Image (cartoon, grey):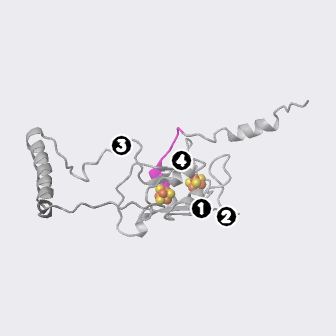
């Protein structure tokens, strides 16, 4: 294996006075000042009253979503919990005698589903891996709380924030298709 040594050119005397960097910074400040005063184009905003417009495809906080009928899409398969790099997700399955799923065609739903937003790095792997399209990174980027406990979002809160995703109906016809297959005429030679 060959190794390439990259020479670092030494700073000149002028650069070592920090003047180029200071003058460069002042130039940017002066440009913004002129834009604000003469063109009315402000580069700052009155946060939190004014909010940044999040671009399409932005990956913010992950929330659980409901289906078109308002039922829980998550089936407690725990794949997202398994892949989550910082282990921010904690799922409690319903257990053998737990509450049944609130929608047809689903075997179960989680008893509890927690995401620790202090750990979450908004990577999107939970969304990628979810077979039920039940968890989505939405546009929230400003999450605040007064305690660590408050930053652990439970199932109820995640479902409320996630809302309904009516456009995604991946398994809508699953039962009908399964029943149709039972009576499907099998071709024999
Ligand atoms: S976005 Fe990434 S870090 Fe956050 S809960 Fe999902 S998998 Fe975990
Ligand atoms: S959100 Fe998706 S991947 Fe995570 S437990 Fe629910 S169904 Fe499985």
Q: Which residue is mark 4?
A: 66
Where are the magenta residues, as a range?
158-167
Q: Which residue is mark 1?
A: 111
Q: Earlier in the sequence, mark 3 or mark 4?
A: 3
Contact (Cβ within 8 Å) of mark 1 with mark 3: no
Q: Earlier in the sequence, mark 4 or mark 2?
A: 4
Q: Is residue 154 left or right of residue 48?
A: right
Q: Earlier in the sequence, mark 3 or mark 2?
A: 3
Contact (Cβ within 8 Å) of mark 1 with mark 2: yes
**Location of residue 2 in the rendering, given as x and y in whole percent from the top left corner:** 45, 60
Is residue 106 visible in the rendered image? The answer is: yes
Is residue 156 visible in the rendered image? The answer is: no
Q: Is residue 97 left or right of residue 58?
A: right
Q: Residue at x 56, y 59 (%)?
A: 83
**Location of residue 8 in the rendering, given as x and y in whole percent from the top left corner:** 27, 61
Disc 4 residue crowd, few under 14, some 14–19, many 20+, Cα 10 Å: many
Q: Residue at x 24, y 53 (%)?
A: 47
Q: Earlier in the sequence, mark 1 or mark 3?
A: 3
Q: Is residue 108 left or right of residue 91?
A: right
User: What number is the disc on residue 95?
Assistant: 2
**Location of residue 25 in the rendering, given as x and y in whole percent from the top left corner:** 15, 54
Q: Residue at x 36, y 58 (%)?
A: 143
Q: Which residue is mark 3?
A: 55
Contact (Cβ within 8 Å) of mark 4 with mark 1: no
Res 93 → quadrant: bottom right
Within the magenta stretch, is there residue 166? Answer: yes
């Amino acid at each position: 294996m060959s190794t390439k040594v990259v020479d670092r050119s030494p700073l000149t005397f002028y650069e070592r006075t920090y003047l180029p960097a200071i003058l460069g910074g002042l130039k940017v400040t002066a440009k913004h000042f002129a834009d604000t005063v003469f063109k009315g184009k402000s580069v700052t905003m009155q946060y939190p009253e004014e909010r940044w417009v999040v671009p399409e495809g932005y990956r913010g906080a992950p929330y659980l979503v409901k289906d078109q009928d308002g039922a829980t899409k998550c089936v407690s398969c725990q794949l997202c919990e398994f892949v989550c790099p910082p282990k921010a997700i904690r799922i409690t399955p319903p257990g053998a005698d737990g509450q049944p799923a609130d929608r047809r065609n689903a075997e179960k739903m989680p008893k509890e589903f927690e995401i620790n937003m202090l750990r979450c790095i908004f990577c999107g792997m939970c969304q990628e891996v979810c077979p039920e399209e039940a968890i989505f990174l939405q546009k929230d980027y400003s999450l605040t709380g007064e305690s660590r406990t408050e930053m652990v979002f439970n199932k109820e809160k995640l479902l409320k924030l996630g809302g309904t995703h009516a456009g995604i109906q991946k398994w809508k016809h699953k039962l009908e298709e399964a029943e149709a297959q039972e009576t499907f005429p099998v071709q024999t030679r």
